[in-house]
Amino acid sequence: MADIDALARRLRSDLGPEQVVTDRQELRTYECDGLAHYKVIPALVVLPHTAGQVATVVRACAEAGVPFVARGSGTGLSGGALPHAEGVLIVTAQMRRIVEIAPADERAVVEPGVINLQVTRAATPHGYYYAPDPSSQQICSIGGNVAENSGGAHCLKYGFTTNHVTGLQIVTPDGDLVRLGGRAPDPPGYDLIGAFVGSEGTLGVATEVTVRLTRLPESVRTLLAAFPSIDAAGAATSAIIAAGVVPAAIEMMDALAIEAAEAAVACGYPPGAAAVLIVELDGPSAEVEAQFTEVTSLCRGEGAFEIRIAADDAERALFWRGRKSAFAAVGRISPDYIVQDGVIPRTALPEVLRRIGEVASAHGVRVANVFHAGDGNLHPLVLFDARVDGEAERADTVSGAIIDLCIEYGGSITGEHGVGMDKAKYMPRMYGDDDLDTMQLVRCAFDPAHLANPGKIFPTPRLCGERPGGDIAARFPGVEVF
């Protein structure tokens, strides 16, 4: 094991003592991200304030042969920012500067610790906003969004983080400060930005991000439709897309998710609904009005028994309040839960949701479904009580079965939460050995020493001198699984 004490002394000298955390109790603050299922206490936490300081930390780690993990706000849900027990956790949360809002270029330049929603707040006076909007947008950071390629409710129309990043300043795993892309929409050469966004911190640390700004739409219309069954809500979703309408968002919640949201935020959704859809349209006023009439008719045609139309921004916010709070709200009806993230073809929604219900029932586990219906990105919430013997294990079994269903129907094991620690074991179910080796060749090109966020994404190391082995404890010293 490298001399962490010596590394800590070096970093205190380079950055200042207040930016280096070594106290065991303070280190526990950073032992997990939003997925508390895995916990690791890092050997050292560093709080850089500038890109230069990040480079200094990474360079020191490289010279000492110490692994490092980058972390933003810690809201990730796949264990992607899980620390290394013998490594350094680089927390970029204090790098919060909005460097520039450039409406003429339709760009914003921000540091990685800037909160997602702050970009929109800074751009709105200029007539623009930042389109990717994860449910955690009030607390998640742009750096974390870049690492996980986050999406959000409006990704149906506007795409994920990768569609909105045009430039990056990164610190490579050997400590060099490098720029990729810039303000141009399509820089020449290899698509290194495309490789970096969504790489979950395995290719380096983002220290500055240039993002696209989107013009505020002329009109926004939002409706809430209540259905007697999930099948009917799924059929309405398919009908809307089949009609050639591409809403900004189509979100679905089932009865259990609605129950949780009501308990948490009193969102006032229609009573008796087995499922609700939130459909939002934006764009030129004439187009939005015509499409809104069509969407309303399609929802009624598929059995919606109540449709509410937001009269103003306040009512629109109320519709979204239940959906945006859904993950946290489940804590009102269950002491513990697993947030899953998988993708299926949207035409398979009714069948897959039925099968999820069958699997959950067979194992005596409840599942609340809340998801981006428009693009088939599921977020089943598997509920359990860890104090009851066997419940955590049954919940984990159901969680894995849901991922298998996504693969069976031609989908993906993750839509926007990343692979991280949680889903690495599922990678061979989607990809063959050659695919996994090719992915790791890219990683090795950036990080031949395998110091940047080791133990994530890939279930069995194959290249760059890594030792084979899929066991979590062997791959990741110090990990505790709860």
Image (cartoon, rainbow, N blue to C red):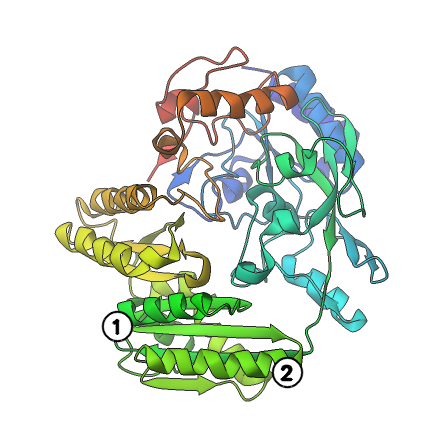
Residue of label 2? 286
Q: Quadrant of the C terminus?
A: top left
* Vertical arrangement, residue 368 with respect to residue 433, above or below: below
Q: Residue at x 62, y 46 (%)?
A: 162
Q: Foreground: 354 or 235?
A: 235
Q: Residue at x 81, y 48 (%)?
A: 183
For the residues marked 1 and 2, what is the alpha-carbon distance in whole angstroms? 32 Å
| Residue 69 image position (x, y, % from top left) | 58, 33
Disc 2 is placed on an element classified as: helix
Q: Residue at x 71, y 67 (%)?
A: 121
| Residue 167 image position (x, y, % from top left) | 75, 43
Residue found at the far top of this picture = 465
Q: Nearer the viewer, mark 1 or mark 2?
A: 2
Q: Which mark is residue 229?
A: 1
Left or right of 379 on screen, residue 20: right
Q: Which mark is residue 200?
A: none
Left or right of 119 on screen, residue 34: left
Residue found at the far right of this picture = 104
Q: Amino acid at mark 1?
A: Ser
Q: Quadrant of residue 464?
A: top right
From this viewpoint, is residue 365 visible? no
Dot 1: within a 10 Å radius of its alpha carbon, few (fewer than 14), some, or many (20 or more) residues?
Answer: some
Left or right of 221 on screen, residue 237: left
Q: Foreground: 434 or 56?
A: 434
| Residue 181 image position (x, y, % from top left) | 77, 39
Disc 1 is placed on an element classified as: loop
* Vertical arrangement, residue 244 with respect to residue 293, above or below: above
Q: Foreground: 147 or 407?
A: 407
| Residue 42 image position (x, y, % from top left) | 53, 32
Left or right of 354 on screen, residue 195: right
Q: Amino acid at mark 2?
A: Ala
